[in-house]
Image (cartoon, rainbow, N blue to C red):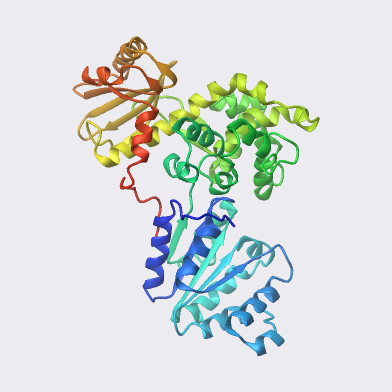
Amino acid sequence: MILMSRFIDREEELEFLRRKWSSEKPELVIIYGRRRIGKTYLLQKFLSEVGGLYLLAEESETVLEDFSERLAEHFNDRLLRENPLRSWGAFFTYLAEKSSERLVVVIDEVQYIAKSQKDFLSTLQKYWDLYLSKTKIMLILCGSLVSFMEGVLSAKSPIYGRRTGVWKVEEMDFFNAWKFHDVDAETAVLIYSVFGGVPQYLADYNPELSFWNNLRELLLSKGAKYYDEPKFLLKQELRDVSRYFSILRAIALGYTRFGQIADKAKIDTKSLAKYLHVLGEMGYITEENPVIGKGKTLYKINDNLFAFWFRFVYPRKSEIEMGLDVIEDIKAEFNDYLGKAFEEIAKQFLVRLNLTGSLPFKFTRIGRWWHKGEEIDVVAINERERKIMLVEVKWKELSKKDAKNILRELKRKAKLIKLEDWEEHYGIIAKKIIEKEELREGGLLVWDLKDFEELRGQDNVPKESRNPTS
């Protein structure tokens, strides 16, 4: 469990659970998301407010007996303690009997039960229809195997149509991840570029150490806590990870088109689509298309730790196993990697500005643009109003002259998009921009890390609702 003094960036999820609890109706809620994302912390925070029973499923043949012990303890039931439940039907019947008043029951890591006890979900469906749906129970099923849990949500699942709410717990954005540690903007970018918005990774980061010493302690030494994290996560969901490793390694190295991935990973194109689909279903990669116009589909790794690991750790495992320090070797390539990570952070920065109304117009879509070797880092558009903002992102210090050269290039690329009668705006986001105010007076939208610091200080930034389904 993640122990923190503050509850960071899970207010929407918590409010979702509170609404379900206050309904007083029978609720069957699904909470899922990848490991270390903070699901258990969220649920335990919720239970600390409303009370209830937390049941953690282990990979064990005695899980029903273990649950019986927890029930007996919770309800001070001596008879149950001496006579443990012997079937899942009896388990659900017992819950129904105890749910004449509001009762919250969380079953965490439910996939372990459902995978080993093939009739678990069908038994739940039967007893939900017979008894539980007539009570005041709030039953929460929580799981970490994303592909499995999405199967539980599918039309083929026994409990399809019974669930009353679903929430996929996602990574935190850059600005919420920044709340974990009181560090400057540059350090926050470095941390996020490797650890993303996964709460457990961020909680394990030690701000008393330098960024590179943290990498050495957490990732870049044999036996480090996250040294084999991507392998561990993939092996939980896949039998043979070798081809998936080849694909992720190819994408991490910049081979992002379908044909390029097939060539680099040495996988037949007829088979590649299946592997890409599986990685997409698990949430580790996503397809990317130009935000406006046409261009070939690209693939990118969503998870920053995966992106870093497959680019820098996986190919150096033999050196790390021998106890060699690979930090200096990685530093030589790191700025190129960081530039791509900063592009994603820049998009999140613009999304926040968009919510505060601080931009020339409210955009409805944001992404990248590319066509025939040309590329624009960030493009934000409002098609209905026919307005567009084109932004170049640079992880370096820019002079006034540099900025003007970038503006000239952006205007040239804008003509390639072939927009007619659109209102155009141009911007730059960089690590640092000299004479920023003078450039702004000339009509250019310019931001650097000082603006990130200012936005961070605004606690009342509105937040978009992420993914409640009810």
User: Which residue lies at the image location 65% right of the left edge and 28% below the top edge?
Assistant: 312
Q: Nearer the viewer, residue 456 or 274?
A: 456
Tag count: 0
Q: Image quarter for residue 288? A: top left
Judged from this view, the residue extending furthest toward the bottom is 79
- The N terminus appears in which quarter of the rendering? bottom right
User: Which residue lies at the image location 46% right of the left edge and 55% below the top edge?
Assistant: 7
One can see residue 37 in this view: yes
Q: Nearer the viewer, residue 155 or 101?
A: 101
Q: Position of residue 74 (x, y in %)?
A: 59, 80
Q: Position of residue 322 (x, y in %)?
A: 81, 30
Residue 440 lies left or right of residue 77; in this view the side is: left
Residue 225 lies left or right of residue 159; in this view the side is: right
Q: Image quarter for residue 275? A: top right
Judged from this view, the residue extending furthest toward the front is 208
Where is 138 relative to 147, above or below? below
Q: Image quarter for residue 11? A: bottom left
User: Which residue lies at the image location 53% right of the left edge and 86% below the top edge?
Assistant: 97
Judged from this view, the residue extending furthest toward the right is 322
Q: Position of residue 432 (x, y in %)?
A: 40, 22
Where is 329 relative to 219, above or below? above
One can see residue 154 in this view: no
Residue 182 lies left or right of residue 272; in this view the side is: left
Q: Position of residue 242 (x, y in %)?
A: 71, 37
Q: Nearer the viewer, residue 94 or 239?
A: 94
- The C terminus appears in which quarter of the rendering? bottom left
User: Which residue lies at the image location 52% right of the left edge and 39% below the top edge?
Assistant: 196
